[in-house]
Image (cartoon, helix red, strand yellow):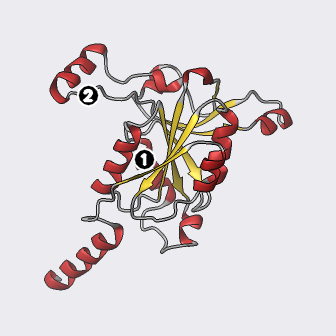
Amino acid sequence: WFCLFRKESGQDSLKNFNETGQFNRPFLGVSYRMISRQAAIANELPEGAYVQKVLPDSPAQKAGIKAGDIVNIEKEKIKTIVYTFVVADLFHYGHLKILEKANELGDCHICGVITDKATSEYRDMPIASFQERKEIISNLRCVDMVMSQNSKDPTENLKQIHEQFKNSKIILVHGSNWKQIPGEEFIKKIKGAVVKLPYYSKLSDNKIQEEIKQRGEKYG
């Protein structure tokens, strides 16, 4: 299973533990799309993860995994899956801390990046494109895998994950700034868990844009 690959050597991990008191989570370096059982049967494909992109010098690349590969997953090794979802436009410290904390809650951290179309249905169109935003999230070592999310509601992605990992508990994580978390109803139905992490109120996309505007007016 991908999530068992580590970027550091054992000595690097021990050095990090001595310095920080923590072992870094494994890092894979891929974005992927799950192949459902129905799709596998219809297209005569194996079930697994269809690899869309492999980051240079990542553990996945070193293991010989390439874009276009369908990789089998040892599902029994994954007891808990954490799912987060983000727009991640103007990626900042608040985004990073949520994803890092979420990463500590399970065996594998999957992050959904909301598409441009889906984002524009409930807020302003992102400044950064979907591919740019997805690239940023894919390069974070606190995220094991990235999925495209075609709605503000992650339920379809959660269903795909649950179908592939029926014996794994799914934890849905979001910041505490949202009272109702999309996907919560499905998570409760499958006896998963919903975790709200503290929202970093100092920074937000709107605050960053407003600050840039004010400085532009002041110094422009």
Q: Quadrant of the C terminus?
A: bottom left
In the rendered image, residue 145, in percent from the top left (x then y), is placed at 50, 38
Q: From this viewpoint, is residue 167 visible?
A: yes
In the rendered image, residue 190, in percent from the top left (x then y), is placed at 65, 43
Q: Which residue appears at 54% of the width and 27% of the height?
A: 79
Mark nearer the viewer, 1 or 2: 2
Identified by mark 1, the residue type is Ile
Which residue is disc 1 drawn over? Answer: 137
Packing grade of label 1 (10 A; few <14, some 14-19, many >=20) is many
- Can you tell which quarter of the image residue 10 is in? top left
The furthest residue to the right: 42
Of residues 200 and 11, which is closer to you in this image? 200
- Can you tell which quarter of the image residue 121 is in? bottom right
Q: Which residue appears at 48% of the width and 27% of the height?
A: 3
Q: Quadrant of the N terminus?
A: top right
Packing grade of label 2 (10 A; few <14, some 14-19, many >=20) is few
Identified by mark 2, the residue type is Gln
Q: From this viewpoint, is residue 157 visible?
A: no
| Disc sitting over residue 22 in the figure | 2
Q: Earlier in the sequence, mark 1 or mark 2?
A: 2
